């Protein structure tokens, strides 16, 4: 339900939780498949959408993660990665997103075709440079380490991010929090933090509040991806407030992955009212057929947040953004003040 209502589209926006791998246009997948002889279940946009988009509530988060196979097979070269990134930044510009952080999992995204990580990063940097100039926006990079790829992959990803921290601002630990124990990833994530990288952790998305509290104790994160089930325990809420940890919230994603029973039951506003710093994001805009405008519509029209409260969430995102202070301050003063 992508939305371009001027009521929301005209708002200058920040977005700090968006997965590049979940933001590939369907037509681009088809173009790449034809160029590289990749077998797809369909080669028309409307038909392929049935296989690459989640339009109805699924039984659980894992079902959504399983839908990413086609996306992974589409990342065939550094040039393709650059194209995908550029098209995402184009889509950001159409929604008036001015401060944007893009995240991706190199070991997952580049694994299928055994791509050179540095060459892909160079492609991403070219797309960023072009987008920042053409659309007058500020863009940051977060390197994801996927729990499902294992502890060795985490070490490899963290070391790579540290090597490139001139361009990469943070690391993120994502996917399968229920399945993969935190203890396997603590040491490399803390190494990243000690090296000067920021840290965000996917936690409390489809897991209870106790996971959020353990995440805070184990990883000392700057931000938490999702974190919505912290609402179930005031100890978790108080810990978030006390530590000043910002939540990267994705309402429509949480509904589609069955992390909340209904969109009306989403705790975004409740967390905001309790004093938690919440932000509003799209997560996987192409997979979930959403955009930040749609997330604002949900926040305002379904959950009852005022436009002023949504602007406050924008400010929370700006303050918590990992983008270089001078770079983001210029954008904030020009478009948000």
Image (cartoon, rainbow, N blue to C red):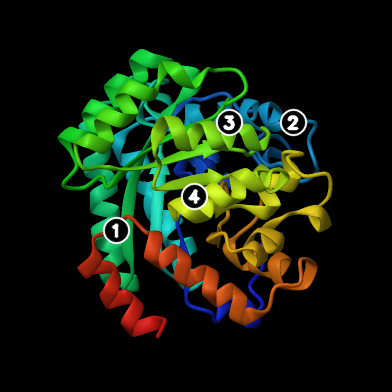
Upstream in sequence: badge 3 or badge 4: 4
Query: Looking at the image, which residue is at 55% across and 82% down?
Result: 10
Mark 4 secondary-structure assignment: loop
Query: Looking at the image, which residue is at 30% across and 20% down?
Result: 155
Q: Nearer the viewer, mark 3 or mark 2?
A: 2
Q: Residues within 10 Å of mark 4 (few under 14, many from 20)?
A: many
Upstream in sequence: badge 3 or badge 1: 3
Mark 1 secondary-structure assignment: loop
Query: Which numbered marker is on residue 323?
Result: 1
| Mark 3–mark 1 CB contact (< 8 Å) | no
Give the distance between the C-alpha atoms of the residues marked 3 and 4, in whole angstroms: 15 Å
87 shown above or below 199: below
Residue 245 visible? The answer is no
| Mark 4–mark 2 CB contact (< 8 Å) | no
Residue 193: x, y in percent? 27, 37
In the foreground, 317 or 31: 317
Give the distance between the C-alpha atoms of the residues marked 2 and 1, in whole angstroms: 32 Å
Upstream in sequence: badge 2 or badge 1: 2
Left or right: where 251 falls relative to 133: right
Give the distance between the C-alpha atoms of the residues marked 4 and 2, in whole angstroms: 20 Å
Q: Residues within 10 Å of mark 3 (few under 14, many from 20)?
A: some
User: Which residue is disc 2 drawn over?
Assistant: 60
Query: Which numbered marker is on residue 135?
Result: none
Mark 2 secondary-structure assignment: loop
Count all numbered tags in the image, as a single digit.
4
116 shown above or below 279: above
User: Which residue is disc 3 drawn over?
Assistant: 68
Q: Residues within 10 Å of mark 1 (few under 14, many from 20)?
A: many
């Amino acid at each position: 339900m992508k939305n371009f209502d001027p009521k929301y589209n005209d708002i200058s926006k920040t977005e700090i939780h968006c997965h590049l791998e979940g933001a590939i246009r369907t037509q681009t997948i088809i173009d790449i498949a034809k160029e590289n002889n990749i077998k797809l279940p369909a080669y028309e946009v409307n038909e392929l959408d049935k296989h690459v988009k989640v339009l109805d509530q699924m039984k659980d988060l894992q079902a959504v993660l399983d839908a990413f196979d086609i996306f992974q097979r589409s990342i065939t070269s550094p040039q393709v990665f650059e194209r995908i990134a550029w098209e995402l930044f184009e889509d950001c510009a159409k929604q008036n997103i001015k401060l944007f952080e893009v995240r991706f999992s190199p070991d997952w995204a580049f694994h299928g075709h055994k791509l050179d990580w540095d060459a892909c990063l160079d492609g991403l940097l070219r797309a960023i440079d072009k987008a920042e100039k053409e659309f007058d926006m500020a863009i940051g990079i977060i390197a994801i380490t996927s729990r499902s790829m294992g502890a060795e992959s985490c070490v490899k990803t963290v070391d790579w991010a540290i090597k490139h921290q001139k361009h990469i601002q943070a690391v993120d630990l994502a996917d399968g929090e229920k399945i993969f124990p935190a203890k396997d990833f603590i040491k490399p994530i803390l190494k990243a933090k000690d090296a000067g990288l920021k840290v965000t952790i996917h936690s409390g998305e489809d897991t209870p509040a106790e996971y959020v509290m353990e995440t805070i104790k184990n990883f000392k994160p700057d931000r938490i991806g999702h974190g919505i089930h912290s609402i179930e325990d005031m100890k978790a809420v108080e810990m978030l407030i006390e530590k000043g940890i910002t939540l990267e919230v994705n309402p429509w994603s949480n509904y589609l992955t069955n992390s909340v029973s209904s969109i009306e039951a989403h705790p975004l506003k409740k967390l905001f009212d309790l004093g938690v710093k919440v932000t509003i994001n799209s997560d996987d805009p192409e997979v979930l057929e959403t955009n930040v405008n749609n997330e604002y519509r949900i926040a305002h029209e379904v959950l009852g947040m005022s436009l002023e409260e949504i602007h406050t969430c924008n400010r929370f995102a700006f303050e918590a953004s990992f983008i270089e202070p001078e770079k983001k301050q210029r954008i904030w003063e020009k478009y948000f003040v």
